Image (spheres, grey):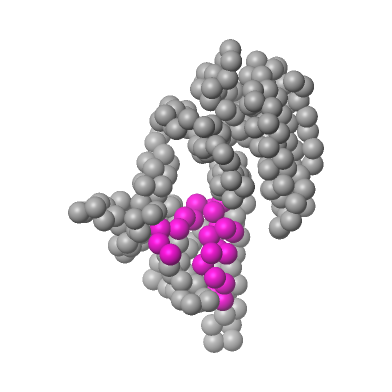
Amino acid sequence: MSSSAAPATGSGTAPAAEEPGLRVLVIDDERPALDELGYLLGRDPRVGEVHATGSPTEALRLLQHLEVDAVFLDVQMPGLSGIDLAQVLTRFRTPPALVFVTAHDEHAVEAFDLDAVDYVLKPVREQRLADAVRRVVAHARPEAVAQEQVPVERGGVTRFVPVAQIRYVEAEGDYARLHTGEESHLLRVPLGQLEQEWAEAGFVRIHRSLLISTAYVEELRVDSGRCSVVVGGRELQVSRRHTRELRDLLVRRARP
């Protein structure tokens, strides 16, 4: 099957004009899965080009003259498996971000040993795929969000707080309290919105009322089945539903 490319479409906030959308290559030998994944990626406003092929061998030929930011690939394919292909891609001068999309969960360890950005299980949900795209953006362009500033009001004065200085965020009703070192600032934005907007800068939800910057995590503690993290010298509780994902994320990021 030959490759194809199409501009991304869909609703939501588009990337800034000076920041082109992601270029991605999708590889899956099953045509329905290939078409669905290409369609869902094309709907994401952060994706600019979607190329697709059903053959790992053809993918290697395409990549000889095609530059992409990320490769979304299946694991079990005839001839060259997704793991085998990923091993080749990691030896590129500028390796693309790797996202495995598969129905088999037993290859996750191998995938993350290859520094995969994410491992998505089929059937693919659009929101889950959007999470993977956010991780690709963080991998490919981490400086984009980290350089942003947040305007906060205090006593008639507007201060501009760099996102990179924010250690964690607490929900306070319809507001969010931003913690930066010894200071805190109240922002009239719900925590869920910040979770989506700052995912590329390394912020993750650890509790229904807490969002943390993984860059400031000093310790991960597990005691009697309960998990917590130390962020900027303060211990914060992690809910059970977020424990495994957070632990896996921190371990992956800590690997050299």
> Looking at the image, can residue 27 be seen?
yes
Q: Which residues, given as a range, are shown in magenta?
A: 187-208
Q: Is 201 contained in the magenta span?
A: yes
Against 21, is 192 above or below?
below
Against 66, is 38 above or below?
below
Against 40, is 106 above or below?
above
Q: Is residue 39 left or right of residue 220?
A: right
Q: Which residue is drawn at the image coordinates 47% and 55% (left, top)?
A: 204
Q: Is residue 1 left or right of residue 209?
A: right
Q: Which residue is drawn at the image coordinates 59% and 59% (left, top)?
A: 197
Count of numbered circles on the image: 0
Q: Quadrant of residue 107?
A: top left
Q: Which residue is drawn at the image coordinates 54% and 82% (left, top)?
A: 154
Q: Position of residue 153 (x, y in %)?
A: 57, 80
The quarter of the rendered structure image containing the C terminus is top left
Q: Is residue 178 left or right of residue 63?
A: left
The quarter of the rendered structure image containing the N terminus is top right
Residue at the extreme top:
79
Q: Which residue is drawn at the image coordinates 35% and 59% (left, top)?
A: 239
Residue at the extreme bottom:
155
Q: Is residue 83 left or right of residue 58?
A: left
Q: Is 198 contained in the magenta span?
A: yes
Q: Position of residue 127 (x, y in %)?
A: 59, 50
